[in-house]
Image: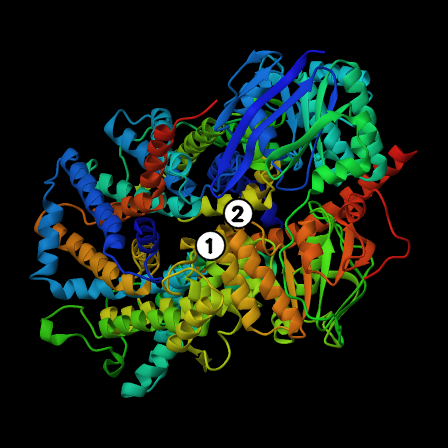
């Protein structure tokens, strides 16, 4: 059972968590601004496709593919922003539309532009070599993050801290947060609400583009139709459970990644559990996590209110005296 | 008078004079979406009229195919519009379809081979029950734990899909098959839902009658029953419903149960009439198609009859198009997505009118 | 003394009502100016116009003698005007500091310059004698502190003119004193303050000059020192035509409603009721008088079952209904005309008929075994429309084709038709034209003459006085006075309504 926490399992965990984390960061920004962005699923898919398409149509550079993916998904997200910000469409319905469109477009373009059906494995792919830091190999967690991993893994963790800092310490972050807390307060304070909304959606497109690109070019080396398979929704669940706090959400995504990695181990160990059942594990886990966060969310509100009341009573007493 | 006419037209159903105005908007959206897609095809180097060729076939030589696809569209539209009316989003129709398919296969394979009509009835009931129970999981999570149904149903879809894979490829697998495929044993013929043989060889089946009846039953539910009234009130003003003594939570549970049962029905029909076995991944996303059908019909079950039929034709048009030209049929999904986007952004027309009125009156001081 | 603000001949119309009718308000520099009147008087409207949240149809605004156009809050802020609304515009989970600097955020390189913001804010707090913990979260501080945050926010933007909209409505007496003190300090620093309120005590204690409004019109203005409680009361409450309503002799019968020591839980945004003892008998109308926001909503909703009871008991027709749900209370003889017909009392996208059948759709003959009998329902609906004078060709039209008065008639038709033993009528004639008002009053009187019990809640004192057999005054969630019909005049009752007086040991 020590295998559960072996360095290789942890390394898998961080690897699997990375696209979840990147998508979650985009989702966090939208969530803080009061936008329910479930279209991240399609943003990732577009990112996966554009990166592979770029690779097979050019010299095979994964780095170029990633940049193209971020731009592609960013452009794709403009459609969502248009529907939701300009035309005030229902966020959930618009997300569904974007997800359907994403699958349709990428599958279509796979045929039309890349001439393949179902999936494509560009033969000319030139992967970015993993970082080899032998010295850190046996350091407990840092080793799993840094040794024999794509550079995107530590970069994404760094991004989590950067997003955290942006939200806490910058003017832009304060403006974003104000939208989610009280649009009335933001409006009357003179914040350009629509502009902020466009910006968080586009940023989520860029983040998810990178997430999708990492998935198709680094974890795998292919694009297949509808390959994101709900990772976007899992990322959304992580955001809810993590209270939209980038650092906490990072931990949650690692947890999800770890669960999936353990699943792989179980399959490899040949315990006779069918692979379909093993693949269910991350989703079931996400559902359980969702239930826990809604139940404690209710209780948290009650607890927060009684804590706030106690503090209030103290301050009122202080005033009277 | 004019103002009253407009207000009554806007929301389909409801009282007073009936006008053709409610049809104008969705038809315009459809035409606009088709034009956009045709332009897109042209830009991608395909023949832009490919869609039209496919659609023409779908309504003439290949009516049978349109019927086959209309069945899940109609049922999907009903499954989605019932909870929508109560302001509950059931995005888990796909999962409920899978569970309905699994349950009906299990029962069908467990029954003696010559069970005939009553066996088929049992199979149908099992499928509907499974869909209902699966939908109630998400509903219970909402009512008792306040878990948002949007994400829970989406996640449950994946669980159901994997479960179906497991059942088809493992538990119910056809061990005697020469080619290994992710499918169950073939269902006994007596438990096959009959196809419409007079239309020639096709997958068009008696499910169409079931689907039409379900649409009519749904309409009956909304317009003629006390539950339908409660659904309407809860969906239009929950506070008003509470004030009148209704229990919104109980209404949500009921609509999800019905919705899940209808969704399960889609799975049953696919298994007993089209595939004759449980195949992993057989569901190409009927749940989300149902959302498009319902939205375009303005969540009106009678409207679903029309929009479901249309999308059946569209889907069939897509596959015909792929057979006739070389345009991938996935483009129909693109069309449907564009339709949802434009339907949900429907404030366009109102906004422009408001701006014009403000400009006319001018701003004082 | 020069004028800081001049609102000259402002007229503003909303559909169906003239909110401001040729209103002129002049506020001098560095004074505290009280703008007083009841709800619907038009004071919020004129201030929204000054702050750019609404635009006047006619009239001129001058700020420090300069004529100007104020099209948005940004314009107002640019002119040095700040407004603190009754419902705070704050971010609940953020610290006080972050709330104050929102939209006016100092930066040092890439990051917020928290240090200089802190310094500047602390300077302001010192100068004006206000103290708030800058690092506390908004949802952790008291209401009084929240208000101070709003004031600091305005001062951080260098406002010279501060509008306070009903600031004391949500404060305890101690917090109110602190606020009034702060206002004095602001005034000393040269700030001009417009203080909107309906509380007489504060007006007399804190303001230099006042403007009184009633029903969209200015009824008086002048130096506070020239005003008395009686005079203010007259100008606020005014005189209204008493409709001649036929009342039979007052012969109250059995107890229909009995409330014993009923309290509701205090929560933000609502005034809770405290230890209410109230009784309504057959054949009487009990009227609850009081300025809105003094607990009337909770009172009505706790009887109706829409708000949970924290303590006490309620019985209807001698049966304890404290634990019963809304449906069962209604079946037990409760009718309820809610104060907000659009939010609670109707569904405007449904037809008139659908709105009318809310109380009876589940019983025979309107439905049988869950199937509705539309013929009977529509017949009954059309009958009800005729009987209750709802102006519509027939009941299958959508509800929002009706005017406000007719919508209210639909609500009344529905609630009356179920023959309730107790009818709660909350603000029954709000937003309703004169003809409909007369009709509604007649209907309430008829119900009472037939021997039913009516609990009337209204912010219009003249309505309460002309209809009620017994008048109960509610102030800050408690019963502070009771009068029999014709026992007191409107100015006397007004004094209790406005918190100036209180009867000892009062209950209903």
Residue B257 in the image: state x and y as whole percent. 45, 69
Name the residue that disc number 2 marks: A237
Residue in view at x 54 percent, y 51 percent:
C434
Q: Is residue B30 above or below residue C171?
A: below
Decide which of A233, C303 is in the foreground and name it: C303
Residue A312 in the image: state x and y as whole percent. 80, 40
Q: CA distance from mark 1 to mark 2?
A: 9 Å
Q: Is residue C269 visible?
A: yes
Q: Is residue B228 above or below residue C141?
A: below
Chain letter for the residue marked with disc 2 in the picture: A
Decide which of B235, B339 is in the foreground and name it: B235
Q: Is residue B277 above or below residue B338?
A: below
Q: Is residue C116 left or right of residue B297?
A: right
Q: Which mark is residue B155?
A: 1
Q: Which mark is residue B16?
A: none
Residue B67 in the image: state x and y as whole percent. 18, 66
């Amino acid at each position: 059972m020590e295998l559960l926490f072996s360095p290789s399992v942890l390394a898998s965990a961080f690897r699997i968590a990375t696209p979840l984390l990147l998508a979650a960061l985009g989702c966090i920004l939208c969530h803080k601004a009061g936008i329910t962005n479930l279209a991240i699923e399609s943003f990732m898919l577009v990112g996966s496709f554009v990166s592979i398409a770029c690779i097979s149509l050019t010299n095979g550079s994964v780095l170029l593919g990633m940049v193209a993916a971020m731009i592609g998904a960013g452009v794709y997200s403009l459609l969502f922003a248009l529907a939701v910000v300009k035309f005030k469409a229902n966020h959930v319905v618009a997300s569904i539309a974007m997800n359907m469109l994403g699958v349709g477009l990428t599958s279509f373009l796979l045929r039309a532009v890349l001439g393949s059906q179902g999936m494509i494995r560009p033969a000319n792919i030139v992967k970015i070599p993993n970082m080899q830091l032998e010295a850190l190999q046996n350091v407990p967690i840092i080793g799993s993050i840094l040794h024999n991993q794509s550079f995107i893994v530590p970069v994404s963790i760094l991004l989590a801290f950067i997003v955290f800092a942006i939200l806490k310490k910058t003017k832009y972050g304060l403006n974003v947060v104000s939208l989610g807390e009280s649009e009335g307060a933001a409006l009357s304070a003179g914040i350009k609400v629509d502009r902020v909304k466009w910006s968080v959606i586009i940023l989520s497109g860029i983040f998810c583009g990178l997430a999708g690109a990492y998935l198709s070019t680094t974890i795998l080396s292919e694009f297949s139709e509808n390959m994101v398979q709900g990772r976007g929704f899992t990322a959304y669940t992580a955001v809810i459970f993590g209270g939209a706090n980038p650092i906490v959400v990072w931990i949650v995504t690692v947890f999800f990644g770890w669960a999936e990695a353990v699943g792989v181990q179980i399959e490899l160990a040949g315990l006779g559990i069918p692979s379909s059942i093993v693949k269910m594990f991350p989703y079931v886990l996400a559902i359980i996590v969702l239930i826990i966060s809604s139940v404690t969310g209710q209780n948290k509100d009650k607890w927060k209110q009684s804590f706030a009341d106690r503090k209030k009573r103290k301050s009122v007493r202080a005033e009277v005296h | 008078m004019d103002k009253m006419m407009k207000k009554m037209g806007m929301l389909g159903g409801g009282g007073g004079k009936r006008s053709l105005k409610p049809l104008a908007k969705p038809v315009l959206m459809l035409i606009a979406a088709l034009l956009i897609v045709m332009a897109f095809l042209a830009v991608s180097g395909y023949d832009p009229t490919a869609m039209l060729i496919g659609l023409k076939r779908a309504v003439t030589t290949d009516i049978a195919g349109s019927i086959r696809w209309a069945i899940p569209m109609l049922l999907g539209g009903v499954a989605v519009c019932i909870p929508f009316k109560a302001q509950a989003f059931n995005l888990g129709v796909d999962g409920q379809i899978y569970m309905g398919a699994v349950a009906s296969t299990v029962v069908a394979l467990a029954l003696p081979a010559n069970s005939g009509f009553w066996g088929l009835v049992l199979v149908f009931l099992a499928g509907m029950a499974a869909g209902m129970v699966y939908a109630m999981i998400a509903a219970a999570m909402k009512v008792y734990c306040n878990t948002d149904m949007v994400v829970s149903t989406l996640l449950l879809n994946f669980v159901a899909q994997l479960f179906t894979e497991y059942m088809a490829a493992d538990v119910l697998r056809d061990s005697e098959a020469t080619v290994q495929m992710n499918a169950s044993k073939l269902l006994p013929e007596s438990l096959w839902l009959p196809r419409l043989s007079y239309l020639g060889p096709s997958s068009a089946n008696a499910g169409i009658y079931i689907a039409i009846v379900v649409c009519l039953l749904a309409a009956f539910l909304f317009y003629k029953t006390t539950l339908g009234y409660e659904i309407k009130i809860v969906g239009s003003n929950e506070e008003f419903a509470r004030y009148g003594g209704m229990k919104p939570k109980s209404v949500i549970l009921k609509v999800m149960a019905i919705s899940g049962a209808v969704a399960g029905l889609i799975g049953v029909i696919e298994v007993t009439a089209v595939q004759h076995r449980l195949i992993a991944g057989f569901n190409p996303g009927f749940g989300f198609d149902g959302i498009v059908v319902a939205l375009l019909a303005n969540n009106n079950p009678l409207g679903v009859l029309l929009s479901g039929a249309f999308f059946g034709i569209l889907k069939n048009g897509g596959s015909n198009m792929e057979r006739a030209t070389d345009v991938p049929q996935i483009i129909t999904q693109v069309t449907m997505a564009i339709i949802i986007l434009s339907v949900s952004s429907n404030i366009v027309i109102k906004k422009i009118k408001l701006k014009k009125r403000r400009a006319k009156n001018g701003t004082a001081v | 003394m020069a004028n800081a603000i001049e609102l000259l001949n402002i007229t503003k119309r909303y559909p169906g009502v003239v909110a401001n009718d040729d209103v002129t308000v002049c506020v001098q520099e560095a004074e505290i100016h009280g703008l007083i009147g009841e709800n619907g008087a038009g004071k919020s409207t004129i201030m929204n116009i000054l702050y750019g949240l609404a635009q006047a149809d006619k009239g001129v605004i001058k700020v420090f003698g300069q004529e100007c156009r104020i099209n948005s809050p940004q314009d107002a802020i640019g002119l040095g005007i700040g407004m603190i609304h009754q419902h705070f515009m704050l971010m609940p989970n953020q610290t006080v500091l972050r709330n104050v600097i929102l939209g006016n955020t100092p930066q040092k390189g890439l990051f917020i310059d928290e240090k200089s913001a802190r310094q500047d804010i602390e300077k302001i707090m010192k100068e004006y004698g206000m103290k708030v913990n800058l690092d506390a979260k908004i949802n952790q501080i008291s209401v009084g502190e929240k208000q101070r945050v709003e004031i600091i926010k305005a001062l951080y933007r260098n406002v010279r003119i501060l509008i306070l909209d009903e600031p004391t409505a949500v404060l305890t007496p101690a917090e109110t004193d602190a606020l009034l003190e702060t206002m004095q300090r602001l005034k000393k620093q040269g700030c001009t303050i417009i203080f909107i309120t309906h509380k007489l005590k504060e007006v007399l204690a804190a303001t230099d000059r006042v403007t009184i409004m009633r029903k969209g019109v200015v009824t008086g203005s002048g130096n506070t020192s020239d005003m008395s409680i009686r005079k203010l009361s007259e100008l606020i409450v005014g005189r209204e035509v008493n409709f001649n309503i036929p009342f039979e002799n007052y012969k109250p019968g059995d107890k229909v409603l009995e409330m014993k020591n009923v309290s509701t839980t205090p929560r933000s945004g609502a005034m809770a009721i405290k230890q209410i003892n109230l009784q309504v008998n057959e054949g009487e109308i009990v009227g609850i008088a009081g300025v809105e926001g003094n607990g009337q909503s909770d009172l009505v909703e706790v009887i109706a079952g829409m708000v949970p009871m924290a303590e006490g008991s309620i019985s209807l027709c001698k049966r304890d209904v404290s634990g019963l749900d809304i449906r069962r209370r209604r079946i037990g003889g409760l009718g309820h005309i809610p104060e907000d017909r659009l939010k609670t009392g109707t569904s405007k996208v449904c037809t008139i008929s659908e709105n009318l059948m809310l109380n009876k759709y589940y019983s025979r003959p309107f439905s049988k075994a869950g199937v509705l009998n539309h013929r009977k329902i529509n017949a009954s609906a059309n009958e009800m429309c005729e009987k209750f004078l709802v102006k519509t060709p027939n009941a299958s039209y959508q509800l929002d084709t009706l005017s406000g008065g007719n919508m209210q008639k639909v609500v009344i038709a529905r609630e009356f038709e179920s023959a309730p033993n107790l009818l709660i009528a909350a603000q029954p004639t709000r937003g309703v034209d004169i003809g409909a008002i007369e009709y509604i009053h007649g209907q309430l009187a008829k119900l009472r003459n037939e021997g039913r019990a009516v609990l009337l809640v209204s912010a219009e004192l003249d309505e309460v006085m002309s209809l009620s057999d017994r008048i109960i005054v509610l102030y800050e969630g408690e019963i502070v006075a009771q009068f029999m019909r014709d026992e007191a005049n409107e100015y006397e009752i007004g004094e209790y309504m406005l918190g100036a007086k209180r009867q000892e040991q009062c209950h209903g």
